Amino acid sequence: MAYYDFLNVILGPLLNIHPLIAVIIMSLFISIIIILITKYTTDQALMKRLKEEMKEHQKQIKELRSNPAKAMEMQKKAMDANMKYMMHSLKPTLITFIPIILIFGWMSANFAYQGIHPDQEFSVSMLFDQGAKGSASAIPPEGISVVGDESQAIQDSKAAWVFKGEEGKHTLEFSYNNNTFYKDVLVSTERKYEPAIGKINREGVNTIQINYKKLTLLPIGFKDWLGWLGVYIWCSIIATMALRKILKVY
């Protein structure tokens, strides 16, 4: 894809540094861009006034708990102010939405998993339609070998193999019911990998997926959940709060 090649040129140097540092840099960069676009594409005087109105309305609602009718009236005013604020916030959101989605796609393609190194064992699963029976076979290309049997029985709509191989991009071949299916895999010393899931959806086969190990950037939390997205979210929240205060963006 052209956009992916373009992002590789622009963001590629980040792949040469530790992934945790790279994701922090990206979160700061994206936060700065969003805040600057918000600041210069919205009426900040109006946004400030609307936020102050919402705070005042919330305060009055708490004070009017003993008067439900007045509280409901004030709640309506608060909702009106909030709707106006959201509508004015829509412009920067529309401007940044597509670029950020593309950048997220690039980050997911480079920071979500651990790559496969030469002679490192990795597993690949083939997922079938419900009730599929029999067996499927792996036909390894030159430079790739199967650890174990090339033919695997289908159990619970799934068959799996373990491979290892030489550095390079390889095309794995699988056979099921006299049909052939393919999945690319990259073996490299660099932090690169092919997409984990290859959608098939034909001849009783749903997907072929490479079972990568998750790339954990911060080994804390539930099941070491802080991968690239968790780190990005926390860093962007902190950066956005700080930047809004420093640049007085409402």
Image (cartoon, rainbow, N blue to C red):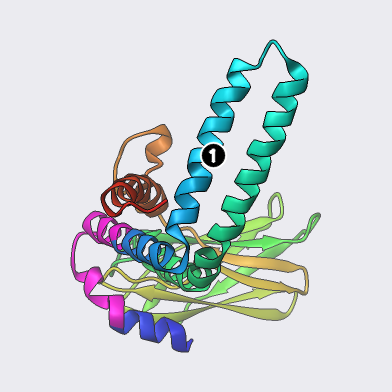
Residue visible at 35% across and 66% down in the picture: 33
Q: How many marks?
A: 1
Q: Nearer the viewer, residue 74 or 163?
A: 74
Q: Amino acid at mark 1?
A: Glu
Q: Position of residue 96 (x, y in %)?
A: 48, 69
Tell me if I can see residue 142 in this picture.
no
Badge 1, how many Cα within 10 Å: few under 14, some, many 20+?
some
| Left or right: residue 64 compared with residue 124 | right
**189 falls in the magenta region:** no
| Left or right: residue 245 compared with residue 173 | left
Hey, which quadrant is residue 205 in on the image?
Answer: bottom right
- Give the residue furthest to the bottom: 2
Residue hosting label 1: 53
| Left or right: residue 73 compared with residue 7 | right
The chief SS type of the magenta part is helix
Q: Is residue 102 above or below residue 23?
A: below
Q: Position of residue 227 (x, y in %)?
A: 37, 49
Q: Position of residue 123 (x, y in %)?
A: 47, 59
Tell me if I can see residue 224 in this picture.
yes
- Give the residue furthest to the top: 66
Hey, which quadrant is residue 77 in on the image?
Answer: top right
Q: Which residues are magenta?
A: 10-28
Q: Nearer the viewer, residue 194 or 141?
A: 194
Q: Is residue 2 above or below residue 209?
A: below
Residue visible at 44% across and 65% down in the picture: 104
Query: Judging from the image, what secondary structure is the residue with disc 1 in?
Result: helix
Residue visible at 51% across and 72% down in the picture: 95
- Give the residue furthest to the right: 131
Q: Nearer the viewer, residue 90 or 8?
A: 90
